[in-house]
Image (cartoon, rainbow, N blue to C red):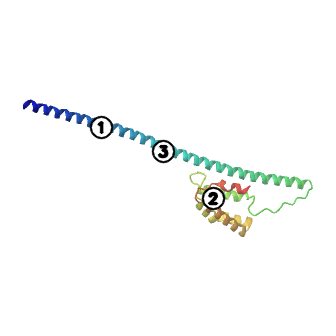
Amino acid sequence: LGRERRGVVHACRNAFDAMRRDAERRETTLVRTASRLDEHAARLRKASDRVACAAELVRQREVRVRNARAALAAEKRLWRRERRDAETKALAEGGVAVTAPPPDALVGLRPEAEALMRGIFRDLDADATGSVPAAALRKALRGDDRLDRLMRNYCGPDAWADCLDALDRRLTALSAKPWGVADCASEAD
């Protein structure tokens, strides 16, 4: 009976030791798996940060490209105006009578008005990203007294009101995205 009891106790100890080793092995596996999951999560966070950074860089590049296009369009308009004036002057000096067609109200915007509008845009663009919310730009252009006086004297109150209404329609259509100065450059050509 004593030998049988020792055999049962020994078998119980072996079973207990086997269960303990199995539990330790499972715990070690769980710790390693949790560690790998943490490493994967860290890599995913870093990748997510890199994607967010890349998206921001792309957005900034698009703004720079849009602003460069607007600057080129403005330079092109200024160059055309200067060339036309020089040709008209040269023809007039040569004795050729040149009658220039009357300019449309806002085609070939005066440099003062364009500078004032760019200044309003830059005031709204506090962090110099090159884009502002369309609603804020619309409100600023409608609310600036200097621009209102200049444009009313330049093209008349009715033409300026028509221009603001057209701009409102355009900016309302663009209100879902930030608005840069080049969004209207294609219409100016």
Residue wearing tag 1: 26
In 3D space, how far apart are the residues under numbered discs 1 and 2 (Cα atoms)? 67 Å
Q: Which amino acid does label 3 sit on?
A: Ser
Looking at this rendering, what residue extends furthest in the left direction?
1
- Provide the secondary structure element on which disc 2 rests: helix
- Apparent side of residue 89 relative to residue 60 in the rendered image (left or right): right
Residue located 7% across and 31% down the image:
2
Q: Nearer the viewer, mark 1 or mark 3?
A: 1
At label 2, which amino acid type do we have? Ile
Please tell me the numbered disc located at residue 171.
none
Q: Label 3 neighbourhood size at 10 Å, few (<14), some (14-19), many (20+)?
A: few
* Dot 1 or dot 2, earlier in sequence: 1
Q: In which quarter of the image is residue 136?
A: bottom right
Q: Which of marks 3 and 2 is in front?
A: 3
Q: What element carries label 3?
A: helix
Looking at the rendered structure, which numbered label has been put on residue 120? 2
Element class at badge 1: helix
Q: Name the residue under label 3.
A: 48
Most extreme residue toward the right is 95
Query: If you read the primary sequence from the N terminus, does the residue marked by circle 1 or circle 3 appear first?
Result: 1
Q: Nearer the viewer, residue 133 or 24?
A: 24
